[in-house]
Amino acid sequence: MTGLATLTRQCWLFAIGSTFFALATVPGFPSAAGAGAANVLCFVGSWFFTTAALMQYVLAPPGIQWWSAAIQFMGTVLFNVSTGASVWAHAVLAERRYVWAPDAAGSLAFLLSGLLAVLVVGLWSPKSVDWQASWINLMGCVAFEVSALAAFVRTTGVTVDEWLANFGTFVGALCFLVAALLVRPKGDPDKCRLA
């Protein structure tokens, strides 16, 4: 994996995964296409995220960046579990609670990873692309956490706030897309600069 892992590939994989999540949750799409189609798009997107996160983990230097990448990778694996479960369970109300736990844990891992990434770039350096990307990424992590909280399934099988759950995912996906494109190296496709 070390030879295949480059920042360029990592950024493109995050961008593609983000696009799948954004398309799946763009306002109106889940109602028009159905929960099944939206869940499949998120499931496919989650694999792009996990592959990108694995590359980020492989490329990360020791220290806070490594911990951020490791926690994010764990979060993406949890999203693989939750999005995979949602493909199967979206129509089975009694099973929907099994989707929420890994989704909430994955969102929490993203939030922790995003906070660590912000520690790396510092609290104030707005001219730095890495700083901009890290803070935009953190906003996406917050949006995913809001989405997870809104997606909690009550004992009746009803989601707390389905619209907010989808909208939080949509906003988070757009933030992740922008952050990935911001740090994508220009020029040499095999350049391995890390944010």
Image (cartoon, rainbow, N blue to C red):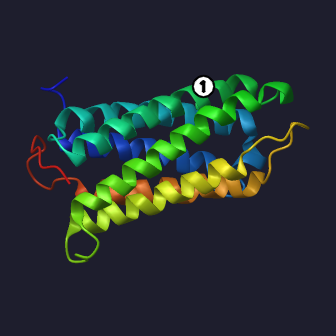
Q: Position of residue 166 (x, y in %)?
A: 67, 52
Give the image quarter of residue 192.
top left
In the shown orientation, is residue 161 left or right of residue 43?
Answer: right
- Element assignment for label 1: helix
Q: Position of residue 116 (x, y in %)?
A: 32, 53
**Measured along the vertical axis of the image, is residue 77 above or below residue 108?**
above
Give the residue at the far right of this rendering. 156
| Quadrant of image for the C terminus | bottom left
The residue carrying pointer 1 sits among few (fewer than 14), some (14 to 19) or many (20 or more) residues within 10 Å by Cα, namely some
**Measured along the vertical axis of the image, is residue 156 above or below residue 119?**
above
Q: Residue at x 55, y 38 (%)?
A: 105
In the shown orientation, is residue 192 left or right of residue 115?
Answer: left
Q: Residue at x 15, y 40 (%)?
A: 62
In depth, the one of 58 and 115 nearer the eye is 115
**Measured along the vertical axis of the image, is residue 129 above or below residue 32?**
below
Let me know if residue 41 appears in the view: no
Let me know if residue 6 appears in the view: yes
Q: Position of residue 163 (x, y in %)?
A: 74, 56
Give the image quarter of residue 126.
bottom left
Q: Residue at x 78, y 48 (%)?
A: 31
In the shown orientation, is residue 110 left or right of residue 57?
Answer: right
Q: Which residue is mark 1?
A: 84
Q: Position of residue 61 (x, y in %)?
A: 14, 41
Q: Amino acid at mark 1?
A: Gly
Q: Residue at x 23, y 63 (%)?
A: 121
